[in-house]
Amino acid sequence: MSASAVVSHSSPTSETSFCSNQKTTSSSSLSRYESQKRRDWNTFGQYLKNHKPPLVLSRCSGAHILEFLRYLDQFGKTKVHVISCPFFGNPNPPAPCPCPLRQAWGSLDALVGRLRAAYEENGGKQEMNPFGARAVRLYLREVRDTQSKARGIGYEKKKRKKPKKVVMEEFHNNNNNNNNGVEEDVGVNGNGGLFMAVGSSSSGGRSSMIFSLPVFN
């Protein structure tokens, strides 16, 4: 299928807004995500309509989604170096090169996520969702790995650090220590560290000492 026979609108101004010149009516109350999802869904509908032969949504498969994603590469603005390019794997190439422009993996991944949600919001069944097909997931993984090597950029997701569970406890020894006029408090300081405050009262006044406590992960 030729790309010229698919969508007749002009080239977009951004990768994630490839349908920016398409007429859509979106409420000002919609979030940015919802507005973008609506535009993407309308563009995909136009793609199916202009397909040769035309496609209906119920007959759309994972293979058609791959065809759609490859079609979008003509609107890409991300330089993907080929293996023979001297800048292959260089995240900051010092000069221009004739390597092709493609849709960035992050843009495609976000696009598929929006269209996957829009498909089900428009009556599609989750188990029949072509945007969730295994072939689509494998294609996105291949694009990610290929672009990571070609551009010298890692796409590994950052692992979220689990917050340290610090138990904040305040206690008073009402049995023996109170008889001796000794009070102990445990708390957390501004830096997240534990401390113990020990105070004693006597006829000569009150004195206190603060000790830092180690925190074990």
Image (spheres, rainbow, N blue to C red):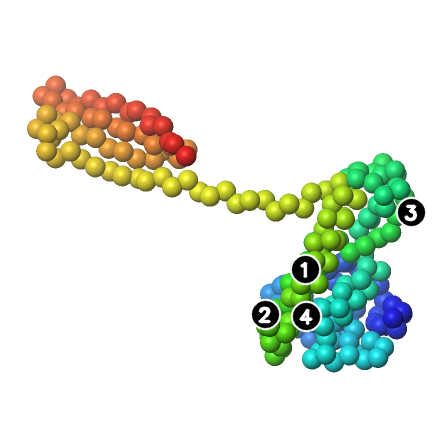
Q: Which residue is mark 3?
A: 98
Residue reaching furthest to the top: 204
| Relative vertical location of residue 208 with respect to residue 73 in this rendering, above or below | above
Q: CA distance from mark 3 to mark 4?
A: 34 Å
Badge 4: residue crowd in 10 Å (few <14, some 14–19, many ≥20)? many
Q: Position of residue 81 (x, y in %)?
A: 84, 45
Mark 2 vs 1: CB contact within 8 A? no
Q: CA distance from mark 4 to mark 1?
A: 11 Å
Q: Which residue is mark 2?
A: 29
Q: CA distance from mark 2 to mark 1?
A: 32 Å
Amino acid bearing label 1 = Arg
Q: CA distance from mark 3 to mark 2?
A: 43 Å
Mark 2 vs 4: CB contact within 8 A? no
Q: Which numbered dot is residue 157? A: none
- Residue 37 visible at all: no
Report helix, strand or loop for mark 4: helix
Give the label, 2 or 1, closer to the camera. 1
Q: Which residue is mark 4?
A: 130
